[in-house]
Image: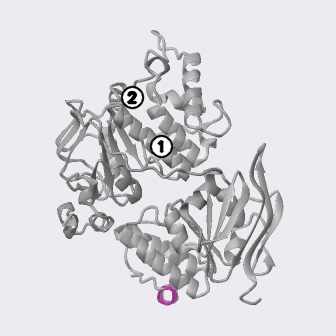
Amino acid sequence: MTDADPVLTLRGITKCFGPLVANDGVSLTLARGEVLALLGENGAGKSTLMSILFGHYVADEGSIEVFGAPLPPGNPKAALAAGIGMVHQHFTLADNLTVLENVMLGSEPLSQPFTRRATARKRLLAVAGQFGLPVDPSARVGNLSVGERQRVEILKALYRGARILILDEPTAVLTPQESEALFATLGQMVAEGLSIIFISHKLGEVLRVSHRIAVLRGGRLVAESAAAGTTEAQLAEWMVGHAVATRARQPAQAVGEVVCALHDVHTAGSTRERLRGVSLELRAGEIVAVAGVSGNGQVALAELLSGLRVPSHGEALVFGEPVRGSAAGLAGRGVARIPEDRAGVGVVGDLPQWENAVAERIGSRWFSNAFGWVRRGAARAHAARVVQRFDVRGGGLDAPARALSGGNMQKLILGRALTPLEAHETEVPKLVVAHQPTWGLDIGAVDFVQQQLIAARDAGAAVLLISDDLDEVLGMGDRIAVMHAGQLTPAEPPERWTRASIGLAMAGAAEAAPAEAAA
């Protein structure tokens, strides 16, 4: 095989799930030392295509060749042996083990009576040096930063001999500085002859790191283009099928009274997921955006304001009353929550979509009678409005929520939080706690969700937006704060921050104060 030959060829890949055509005759090639970006809306077929490539699904039609040899279908072990590695957005590392132990997991047969740690360590350091990924093999993974953990995940794949690497949303949980380090690593990897499939919703990053771009829409390959000379607007249009307007920043018009106030709040919990002396005020008619790397206390903050935690020290007031750990009570008084863990917390997977759409208000008089019986007609009618308004696609009202794609599951949760009751069309929540509300959504859905949050703010709601996406934080926040190790900076106007200063604050740098960023 010459360098001009493709290292990966997909021919006519078709996959159906009942009447749903997830992939429709998709053909792609990947060259040695090439970064191919794979784009598409939620449900466009990206995940299915990568699952077929990695052996988790079997295609109904089509074939795959890796380095000129046929790839056996439905065999992840064969994909690994052929040199295909995948780094998922959610890492699969054991925090209580060292870097070396994580890398070695699964790489030696269970029948082997002893591990070859010295040999493995030597090999790991050699791979790390070759690809510019410095690592301490004896470091415990639980003590590593998110960027360092991602480096370990990449090294796991390279240690196993990956020559084709699939990166799924690789910068989603990285600081800007960590993203820059990753881009440098990608450059080193392609210089060493690796080929990369780069999946991301961040169009600017796609244009920066990729050589070629492929776009899926509705399961079909609708566009292929060299990255050079292509614009973000063109990519967005290919993804959604029509031009996507760029919206100017929409600042708050009328900031009102304090809806929520935290004073020196501490919470119990693990070191990475507790609050330590957090003070914050949320006012009606504004969006306060909180940036930070996941795992620095954001979950504790969101759960506190949703009634799922109580302070161990300090004072937390919502609507002027102390938080007492009643999620149902706060929901009934006008707190709408959009949890980060949509599958584990946001929905009950085995319940139908219509029940999930009304779950947090099922006890209200709109959906239950005086005897506690559910008014199914009213509940289903409201659920239908949620599904239509937020374009939730996947099986209908009676289909279980677990059957939804991640993006459509998120839209169902957002619709439940933000869709007013029919009898109160102008009703909006008084406080919206939105934790990663656009995570995993395509560009069209992101724009829609952000406009819904802005509309809730303009109607008088206080909105707490917790996000890893700095573009979202800078574009949406009327005030911005940064969370690190359970502590929160003062919330300041976006003009007081830069991307660099936010990134430093996310990493815990003391010199990242917003006042200095404005200097």
Q: Relative to 66, does residue 25 appear above or below in the rendering? A: above
Quarter occupied by residue 179: bottom left
Left or right of residue 33: residue 293: left
Q: Is residue 235 visible?
A: yes
Q: Which residue does the image show at 34% across and 28% down from the upper left? A: 334
The quadrant in which the C terminus is found is bottom left
Residue at image coords 62%, 83%: 33
Q: Give the residue at mark 2.
A: 428
> Which residue in the structure is indicated by mark 1?
449
Residue 281, image x, y percentages: 21, 42
Q: Which residues are magenta?
A: 121-131
Residue 501 in the image: x percent, y percent?
27, 66
Tell which of 371 and 220 is nearer to you: 220
Report whether 28 appears left or right of 400: right
Point out residue 169 in the picture as x, y percentages from the top left corner.
Answer: 52, 63
Colour mapping used in the image = one colour
Identify which residue, 134 or 408, lies in the foreground. 408
Q: Quadrant of residue 502?
A: bottom left
Q: Are marks 1 and 2 in contact (CB under 8 Å)?
A: no
**Callout 2 crowding tier (Cα within 10 Å): few <14, some 14–19, many ≥20:** many
Magenta span has 319?
A: no
Residue nearer the viewer, 478 or 361: 478
Gap in angstroms between the C-alphas marked 1 and 2: 15 Å
State the image coordinates of residue 136 (x, y, percent, origin top left): 39, 82
Image point (20%, 44%), residue name: 312
Amino acid under label 2?
A: Val
Relative to residue 148, is residue 131 drawn left or right? right
In this rendering, the answer to whether 466 lies above or below 513 is: above
Q: Main secondary structure of the magenta part?
A: helix
Quadrant, the N terminus: bottom right
Q: Quadrant of residue 39?
A: bottom right
Check residue 180 in the rendering and tell me which mark sits there, or answer none: none
